[in-house]
Image (cartoon, rainbow, N blue to C red):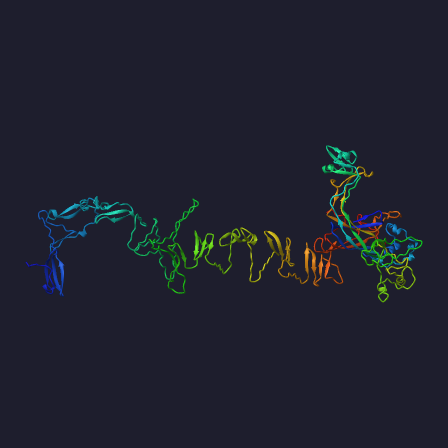
C-alpha cells in the first residue's frame, strides 16, 4: 500500500516483515524497480515526455521542474523510437543486519502533572466529561471511560518511554541504474534524474605519521575515519570485449543511417562517448532516470499510547500506557520495514521544492527479495504493520 | 288158502317168471316177481269195501260223474276230481275218518280243523291259521335280526338290525375268518385292534396286472368347516409296540419300493425311514420337504440342527451345486468364534443389496478384519468409490473413475519400511486443495506451486511463490536461511495511483 508523503517528492511503497524479538539476522536485500507499463514499447520517460504531452501537465514534482533549456531542445533528444523505457530502472542490493530487542513495561513520563485515580480532575481540566450517574466519557472520543481507566494514572502532556530499540543497520552494497552520467551545464540547474543513497563507512587506517608501527594491528590506536558516499549509480557497462573489440550492434543501439540527422542518434558517436558506467557522456544523450527516490530500512514495534485531548488544537493531552484501552505495546515481535520511496508527482502542486506527491510518477514495477540468515526463519510480510 | 311167507325173499327163493307174496313187517303185504334173475316188488293195499246197499231205503244208486258203478265188477267208483269246484271258507266242513267212531266217515268244520291244528307258534281264527312267531321269539321288532335262543325259541336282536340295506350291530362284531366289507368301512368307535396271533397289515388289494396300484390314505380327523373359527384338526399318531425293561420298543418303519429296471416283477420294498425306540429317525434316502420341523434339534452324527442353531463337532462343509443363500430377515449374518457372541463378525445386507462386513470387539478395538488371498484381492466398485473409514469417519476414498483418485480425510502419511516410490509415467503431481504444489514432469524437473513459466531451459527445481520462497535451518536461533520476496505494481485505484505514461 503506497502512501503519500509531503516532505519528499516520493511515493512510498512499504512492506513490514514480522520478526521475533531478539533474533539476530543478516542478509542481502535486493530492490529492483523499473518504470514502465508492462514493458510496453515506449521510449524512456524523458523522451516520452518530450515527444508527447504528459498527463496532468509537465509538473511531475520539483525535481523535474527545473529543466534547463537544453532539455527543451528537441534536437538534443533524438531517442525516439528506441523504446528504452526498460532503461528507466534502479536496482539496489543492501546488506541488512541486526534485529530488535524488546522488553515489556514502559517508562512513565517524568515531571508532568498526573491524574491518579482522578477522573474528576480530568473532568475539571477538560479531558473528560461527567455524564452523571458515575458515568464519564472522554472529551475527544465521547467513549465511556472504563473503571480501569478511571483508576489509572494519566500523565498530562507527557509521553511514555519504553526499553525497546531496533539495531537494524544496512549497507548499500551496490546500486545500478542508468540515471548517472548526466553532466551539469553551466547555466542550467541540474536535471535531477536521481537522488543519491547514503553509504557510510567506518574505516580505520594506518598511521598518519608515515610510520609502520602498528600497521596491521587490529588494535590500531587511530580513530576510525567515517566516510560518507552518496551513491547515484554503480556498475560498468561493457561495450568492448576483452580484446577491446566493439560489441557492435548486437549489444548497442545503432541506426546505421550515417547522416547527421539529430533526431536520431547514430550508434557510432554514441559508443564513442560511452562512459565506463555505461552512460553516454553527451549532455543530452542520457535521458534515463531513476524511479527510486530513496530506500529506508529500519525496525519498528508497536508502541501506542492511549492519548486523549481536551482540544486537539491546543495540543494538551493526557496519556496512559498501563490502563488505556487503546494502549499497545508489543514485545514479542517487531517489523523490519522496507520503505521504498518512488519518484512522486503532484500534478496540482506548485513549482516549489518538496511538493506533496499524490501519485507515483509513473507506473512502477518493484521486485524485492530478502535473504536473511541467522537466528530465525519466522517471517511474515504484510502491507501494514503487524498487530499479531 | 296159500301161506304167505314173512320176510324179504332172496333171488333164489323165487323162480323165473313167478310171483310170490311176502309179508314185510312194518310195510305190509308185498308182491315179488323174478324177471331175468332180478326181483321186482309191489306193495299191496287192502281192497275197498263195496258200498252197502240198503235195499229198503233205496234200491238204486244214482249214477253221476262222481259216482260210477262198474258194471262188470260192481265196484263203485268215486271220482272226486269230478266234483264241482268251490272256494272253501270259514263255516265249511271237510270229511274225515273218525277213529274214535270205528273209522266212520264224519264231517268236521274247518274252524274245528284249524283249531285242532293251532298251537305254539300257530294261531287260528275263522278257520284261518296264522304263524305267531312271538310264541317262540322274544323281543320282536322291525329290522331286528332273529337269533336262536334255544332249540325251540328265538330272539329278535335289538343290537343287530338290518334295514334292508344296512346291517347295524350294537356291540362287538367278531369274526373268526376274513370279514369282507363291500364298500367303505366306517368305524364309529375309536379303535381297530388286530389279533396277536399274527402280524397285522393294512393294505389295498393289488390291482390288475395292467393297472397302477391304489392309494392308501390314513387321515386324522378334521374339524367341520364353517360357523366356528379357529378349531384344530386331529393329529395322526403312529406308535410302535412297547417293550419292557431293557427290551427295545418297536420301530416305526416306512418302506417304499423304488422303481427298478423295466419288467413285470414287483419292485422290492426298502426302508426309507425308521423311527426307532430311542426316538431317533433314520432316513435311508434324502430328506426332502418345504419345512422340516423339530421341536429341539436335528442331529446328524455330530451335527446338530436346532430351531436356530447348527452345530457340529467337526469341520462343517456346505457344498452346494448351485448357490448358497443365507437369507436373514434382518439382513444380518453373524460369525462367532466358539460361541463368543460379544466378539463377532457380521455381514449385513440392507436395501438394494448394500452390504457391510463388520467385526465387533466387545472389550477393545482389536477385532481386526483381514483379507488374505493367495492371489489378488480385487475390489470392484461400480459406484466408482471405495471408502476406508475409521470408526465411521471417512479416511480414504478411492475414486475409481477414469482418473482414479485416492481422497484422504485427515493428515496422511506414507510410511514405508523401505523406499517409497511414486512413479508416474506422464508426471507426478502432489496437490493441496486441488492445486499442484509439487509437480514432476516427464523430464524429471520438479515444479513447486504450479510454477508455469515457459523457460527456454527448465531447472531441476522450479518454484512459484509469493512472499515466501524458501527457508532452511536447524532450529530457532540456529542456521536459518530464508528467501523472501514481494512484488508490487500500483493498480491505480484508491490511493495506489500512478501517472499514465505520456503517449
Q: From the viewer's perspective, is residue A327 above or below residue B467?
A: above
User: Could one spot residue B128 in this view of the protein?
Assistant: no
Q: From the viewer's perspective, is residue A145 above or below residue A343?
A: above
Q: Position of residue B311 (x, y in %)?
A: 46, 55
Q: Is B292 on the left or on the right of B498, as rendered?
A: left
**Quadrant in the rendering for residue A153:** top right
Viewer-nearest residue: B495 or A127: A127
Q: Is A192 on the left or on the right of B402, as rendered?
A: right
Q: Position of residue A87 (x, y in %)?
A: 84, 57
Viewer-nearest residue: A243 or B139: A243
Viewer-nearest residue: B100 or A257: A257
User: Could one spot residue A167 in this view of the protein?
Assistant: yes
Viewer-nearest residue: B158 or B202: B202
Q: Position of residue B318 (x, y in %)?
A: 49, 59
Q: Position of residue B181 (x, y in %)?
A: 33, 54
Q: Is B426 on the left or on the right of A241, as rendered?
A: left
Amino acid at each position: 500500500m503506497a502512501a503519500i508523503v509531503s516532505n519528499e517528492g516520493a511515493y512510498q511503497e512499504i512492506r513490514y516483515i514480522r520478526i521475533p524479538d531478539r533474533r539476530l539476522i543478516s542478509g542481502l536485500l535486493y530492490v529492483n524497480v523499473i518504470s514502465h507499463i508492462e514493458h510496453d514499447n515506449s521510449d524512456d520517460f524523458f523522451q516520452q515526455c518530450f515527444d508527447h504531452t504528459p498527463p496532468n501537465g509537465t509538473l511531475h514534482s520539483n525535481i523535474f521542474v527545473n529543466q534547463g533549456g537544453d532539455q527543451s531542445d528537441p534536437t538534443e533528444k533524438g531517442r525516439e523510437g528506441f523504446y528504452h523505457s526498460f532503461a528507466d530502472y534502479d536496482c539496489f542490493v543492501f546488506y541488512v543486519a541486526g534485529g530488535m530487542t524488546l522488553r515489556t513495561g514502559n517508562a512513565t513520563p517524568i515531571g508532568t502533572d498526573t491524574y491518579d485515580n482522578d477522573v474528576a480532575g480530568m473532568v475539571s481540566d477538560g479531558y473528560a466529561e461527567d455524564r452523571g450517574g458515575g458515568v464519564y466519557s472522554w472529551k475527544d472520543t465521547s467513549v465511556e471511560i472504563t473503571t480501569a481507566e478511571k483508576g489509572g494514572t494519566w500523565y498530562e502532556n507527557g509521553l511514555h518511554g519504553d526499553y525497546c530499540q531496533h539495531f537494524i543497520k544496512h549497507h548499500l552494497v551496490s546500486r545500478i541504474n542508468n540515471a548517472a552520467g548526466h553532466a551539469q551545464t553551466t547555466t542550467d540547474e541540474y536535471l535531477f534524474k536521481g537522488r543519491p543513497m547514503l553509504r557510510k563507512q567506518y574505516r580505520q587506517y594506518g598511521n598518519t605519521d608515515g610510520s609502520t608501527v602498528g600497521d596491521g594491528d587490529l588494535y590500531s590506536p587511530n580513530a576510525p575515519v567515517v566516510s560518507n558516499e552518496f551513491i547515484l549509480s554503480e556498475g560498468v557497462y561493457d561495450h568492448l570485449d576483452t580484446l577491446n573489440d566493439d560489441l557492435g550492434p548486437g549489444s548497442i543501439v545503432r541506426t546505421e543511417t550515417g547522416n547527421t540527422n539529430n533526431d536520431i542518434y547514430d550508434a557510432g558517436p554514441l559508443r564513442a562517448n560511452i562512459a565506463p558506467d555505461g552512460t553516454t557522456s553527451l549532455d543530452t544523450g542520457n535521458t534515463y532516470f531513476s524511479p527510486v527516490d530513496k530506500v529506508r530500512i529500519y525496525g519498528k514495534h508497536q508502541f501506542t499510547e492511549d492519548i486523549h485531548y481536551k482540544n486537539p488544537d491546543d495540543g494538551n493531552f493526557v496519556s496512559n500506557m498501563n490502563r488505556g484501552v487503546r494502549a499497545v505495546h508489543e514485545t514479542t515481535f517487531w517489523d523490519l520495514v522496507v520503505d521504498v520511496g518512488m519518484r512522486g508527482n503532484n500534478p496540482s502542486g506548485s513549482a516549489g521544492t518538496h511538493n506533496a506527491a499524490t501519485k507515483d510518477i509513473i507506473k512502477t514495477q518493484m521486485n524485492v527479495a530478502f535473504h536473511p540468515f541467522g537466528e530465525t526463519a519466522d517471517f511474515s510480510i504484510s502491507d501494514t504493520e503487524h498487530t499479531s | 288158502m296159500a301161506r304167505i311167507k314173512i320176510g324179504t325173499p332172496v333171488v333164489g327163493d323165487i323162480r323165473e317168471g313167478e310171483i310170490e307174496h311176502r309179508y314185510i313187517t312194518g310195510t305190509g303185504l308185498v308182491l315179488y316177481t323174478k324177471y331175468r334173475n332180478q326181483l321186482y316188488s309191489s306193495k299191496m293195499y287192502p281192497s275197498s269195501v263195496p258200498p252197502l246197499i240198503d235195499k229198503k231205503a233205496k234200491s238204486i244208486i244214482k249214477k253221476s260223474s262222481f259216482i260210477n258203478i262198474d258194471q262188470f265188477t260192481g265196484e263203485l267208483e268215486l271220482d272226486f276230481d269230478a266234483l264241482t269246484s268251490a272256494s272253501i271258507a270259514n263255516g265249511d266242513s271237510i270229511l274225515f275218518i273218525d277213529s274214535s267212531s270205528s273209522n266212520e266217515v264224519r264231517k268236521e268244520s274247518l274252524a274245528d280243523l284249524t283249531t285242532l291244528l293251532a298251537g305254539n307258534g300257530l294261531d287260528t281264527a275263522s278257520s284261518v291259521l296264522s304263524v305267531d312267531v312271538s310264541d317262540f321269539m322274544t323281543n320282536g321288532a322291525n329290522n331286528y335280526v332273529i337269533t336262536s335262543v334255544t332249540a325251540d325259541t328265538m330272539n329278535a336282536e335289538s343290537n343287530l338290525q338290518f334295514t334292508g340295506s344296512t346291517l347295524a350291530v350294537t356291540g362287538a362284531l367278531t369274526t373268526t375268518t376274513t370279514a369282507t366289507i363291500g364298500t367303505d368301512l366306517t368305524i364309529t368307535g375309536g379303535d381297530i385292534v388286530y389279533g396277536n396271533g399274527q402280524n397285522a397289515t393294512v393294505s389295498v388289494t393289488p390291482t390288475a396286472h395292467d393297472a397302477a396300484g391304489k392309494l392308501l390314505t390314513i387321515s386324522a380327523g378334521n374339524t367341520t368347516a364353517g360357523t366356528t373359527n379357529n378349531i384344530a384338526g386331529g393329529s395322526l399318531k403312529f406308535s410302535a409296540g412297547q417293550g419292557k425293561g431293557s427290551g427295545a420298543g418297536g420301530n416305526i418303519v416306512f418302506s417304499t419300493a423304488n422303481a427298478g429296471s423295466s419288467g413285470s416283477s414287483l419292485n422290492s420294498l426298502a426302508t426309507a425311514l425308521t423311527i426307532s425306540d430311542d426316538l431317533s429317525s433314520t432316513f435311508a434316502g434324502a430328506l426332502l420337504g418345504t419345512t422340516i420341523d423339530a421341536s429341539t434339534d436335528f442331529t446328524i452324527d455330530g451335527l446338530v440342527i436346532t430351531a436356530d442353531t447348527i452345530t457340529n463337532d467337526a469341520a462343517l462343509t456346505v457344498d452346494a451345486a448351485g448357490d448358497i443363500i443365507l437369507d436373514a430377515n434382518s439382513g444380518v449374518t453373524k460369525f462367532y468364534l466358539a460361541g463368543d457372541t460379544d466378539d463377532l463378525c457380521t455381514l449385513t445386507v440392507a436395501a438394494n443389496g448394500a452390504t457391510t462386513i463388520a467385526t465387533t470387539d466387545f472389550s477393545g478395538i482389536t477385532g481386526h478384519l483381514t483379507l488374505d488371498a493367495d492371489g489378488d484381492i480385487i475390489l470392484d466398485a461400480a459406484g466408482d468409490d471405495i471408502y476406508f473409514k475409521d470408526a465411521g469417519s471417512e479416511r480414504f476414498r478411492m475414486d475409481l473413475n477414469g482418473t482414479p483418485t485416492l481422497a484422504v480425510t485427515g493428515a496422511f502419511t506414507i510410511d514405508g519400511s523401505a523406499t517409497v516410490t511414486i512413479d508416474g509415467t506422464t508426471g507426478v503431481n502432489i496437490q493441496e486443495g486441488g492445486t499442484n504444489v509439487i509437480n514432476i514432469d516427464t523430464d524429471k524437473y520438479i515444479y513447486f506451486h504450479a510454477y508455469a513459466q515457459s523457460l527456454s531451459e527448465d531447472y531441476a527445481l522450479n518454484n512459484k511463490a509469493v512472499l515466501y520462497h524458501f527457508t532452511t535451518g536447524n532450529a530457532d536461533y540456529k542456521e536459518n536461511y530464508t528467501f523472501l520476496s514481494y512484488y508490487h505494481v500500483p493498480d491505480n485505484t484508491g490511493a495506489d495511483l500512478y501517472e499514465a505514461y505520456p503517449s
